[in-house]
Amino acid sequence: MSVTVEMAHHVTDELVAGLNHLLPQLSSSAPPLTTDQVAKLIDSSAAALFVAREDQRIVGTLTLVVFAIPSGVRAWIEDVVVDGAARGRGVGEALMRAAIDEAKGRGVRSIDLTSRPSRAAANALYLKLGFEARETNVYRFFIENEM
Ligand SMILES: CC(C)(COP(=O)(O)OP(=O)(O)OC[C@H]1O[C@@H](n2cnc3c(N)ncnc32)[C@H](O)[C@@H]1OP(=O)(O)O)[C@@H](O)C(=O)NCCC(=O)NCCS
């Protein structure tokens, strides 16, 4: 089966359903996306939502976020997930390569991402593509804790 990767430019029911099929395979706590949320994501100039297809069917996604800060134009890759039934066939790698190409085209200096050590497949994928582990602390501030 051949894999194609595209950047999503239009919200369709098929896109929303495809993302909502994939999201629980990444995070059990992420609520389903609404059409409006997907539309906002696609409309954002900072974010590029990629989808991978096999035989037209959506089988994977990731989001590239590009932003300018004083030290340069930087990027993050987030929410990388491939359908359980389509893993091990190069879909994740094709998505990542498309995102890296897009980042290069946008003049990005570096791309960051995080991945829990228990995500063995993901960590192996990132290392294979040339990502290097950095010695840094990762913090998160939960806005809802403030309320
Ligand atoms: C991580 C994930 C996206 C990989 O997608 P995939 O389409 O199966 O990966 P690919 O087939 O493109 O594999 C590319 C490379 O990834 C690594 N890899 C993929 N699956 C692997 C596995 N089960 N074990 C070890 N390495 C693996 C290999 O380096 C592989 O290269 P190789 O085929 O030359 O050995 C997929 O497993 C997934 O969605 N996992 C659940 C969600 C997740 O962990 N997301 C990442 C969040 S940080």
Image: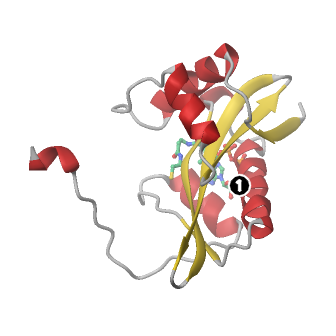
Numbered-mark total: 1
User: Residue at left 37%, top 31%?
Assistant: 28
> Does dot 1 land on a helix, a strand or a loop?
helix
How far across and down, in percent of the image, does residue 144 sit?
17, 43
How far across and down, in percent of the image, does residue 89 sit?
77, 41
38, above or below 102, in the image: above
Q: Amino acid at mark 1?
A: Met
- Whether residue 126 sits left or right of residue 25 in the image: it is right
Q: Nearer the viewer, residue 103 or 93?
A: 103
Tell me if the residue at label 1 has its CB under 8 Å from ligand 1. yes
Q: How is the image coloured?
A: secondary structure
Q: Quadrant of the N terminus?
A: top right
Q: Which residue is mark 1?
A: 96
120, above or below 39, in the image: below
User: Residue at left 81%, top 41%?
Assistant: 5
User: Residue at left 41%, top 82%?
Assistant: 135
- Whether residue 140 sits left or right of residue 48 in the image: it is left
How far across and down, in percent of the image, does residue 38 sit?
56, 30
The residue at the far left in this view is 147
User: Residue at left 53%, top 85%?
Assistant: 71
58, above or below 73, in the image: above
The residue at the far top in this view is 13
34, above or below 76, in the image: above
How far across and down, in percent of the image, does residue 118 sit?
42, 54
Q: Residues within 10 Å of mark 1 (few under 14, many from 20)?
A: many
Q: Nearer the viewer, residue 100 or 147?
A: 147
Q: Quadrant of the C terminus?
A: top left
